[in-house]
Amino acid sequence: MENSEDDWIGKFIHHLGYERRLSPLTCKHYRRDLDALKTFCDEVQVARWGDLDSEHIRACSAMSYRRGLSARSIQRRLSAARTFFRYLLREKHVKQNPVESVSAPKAGKRLPANLDADRMARLLEIRGEGPLVDRDRAILELLYSSGLRLAELTGLNCGDVDMDDATVHVTGKGNKDRIIPVGRFAIAALVRWEQVRTKLADADETALFVSRRGTRLSGRSVQSRVNYWARRQGIDTKVYPHLFRHSFATHLLESSHDLRGVQELLGHANISTTQVYTHLDFQHLAQIYDKTHPRAKAKDTA
């Protein structure tokens, strides 16, 4: 590519940093992706940005994919190139944007992480005494028992849990209310917490879970305590509040195979959101098949 064409990447990066006020890190990522496009242009002997067409862009994406670049990274590179050419159009340096008609490859959905039942049971075996331990035990049990989002948990008030009916009333996304069953271990932990809650809570505080200062517990504090207990219990993977929700959904679906029911419990507006857990369920079933089916276990002796 001609040296004068290289200057346009620098001008564009300056535009991003000083006109659009993007962070230095974002500008660095743009430059890296555009340098990769320039390298491709040199390889196929395209001398000017205006000579680049949609077939070149597709070829560049295909080459990147063959060299092991992930679909998400290719999506990012195309996005950077598309924005760059919009800038070149604005500056009247090119007559068309060759990236506009190019579709990015679909990135595979990331399956949500989860803890298996044994490790979850180990995590929940919290030992110790005192109001903070009782509070944390109730939080962890309720997260796993009912699959609550972090904001739903911290938003709970004292009257939201019906101990007799073993249910919890939560307000989810879009201010949608739902009633969720609460398991017996979580109920027992909540009963114990309610008995000692007054030792921490301010007199007029309505929140179910409170900090040592007596006010509503923050999401950040819950994350910190979950991380603390995961380390304390010897869990060897990263543990965070939403992991309890993923584990709740996965274990429930493995046992019930009731996708609609799991959708209702999670509060998903669309069942397509819940369907990601069917992939995890299929992996579980495939493992069972491989271990137990006579034909699966048979070795190929040919």
Image (cartoon, rainbow, N blue to C red):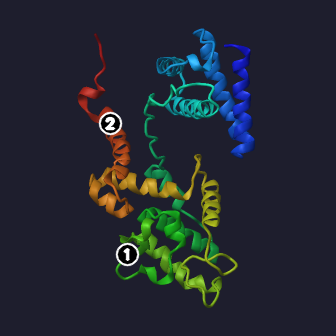
Residue 291, position as x, y percentages in the image? 33, 34
Between residue 231 and residue 40, name the one nearer to us. 40
Tell me if residue 29 can be seen.
Answer: yes
Would you identify the image quadrant in which residue 20 lies?
top right
Would you identify the image quadrant in which residue 166 lies?
bottom left
The residue shown at (61%, 71%) is 133
Q: Which residue is mark 2?
A: 286
Q: What amino acid is found at the position of numbered circle 2 in the picture?
A: Ala
Between residue 134 and residue 170, name the one nearer to us. 170
Quarter of the image that includes the C terminus: top left
Count the numbered circles shown: 2
Horizontal side, residue 119 vs residue 223: left or right: left
The residue shown at (26%, 33%) is 293
Q: What amino acid is found at the position of numbered circle 1 in the picture?
A: Thr
The residue shown at (72%, 46%) is 21
Q: Mark 1 packing: few (<14 Cα in 10 Å), some, or many (20+)?
A: some
Horizontal side, residue 37 vs residue 299: left or right: right
Q: CA distance from mark 2 to mark 1?
A: 34 Å
Q: Can you tell which mark lies on residue 167? A: 1
**Which secondary structure lies at badge 1?**
strand
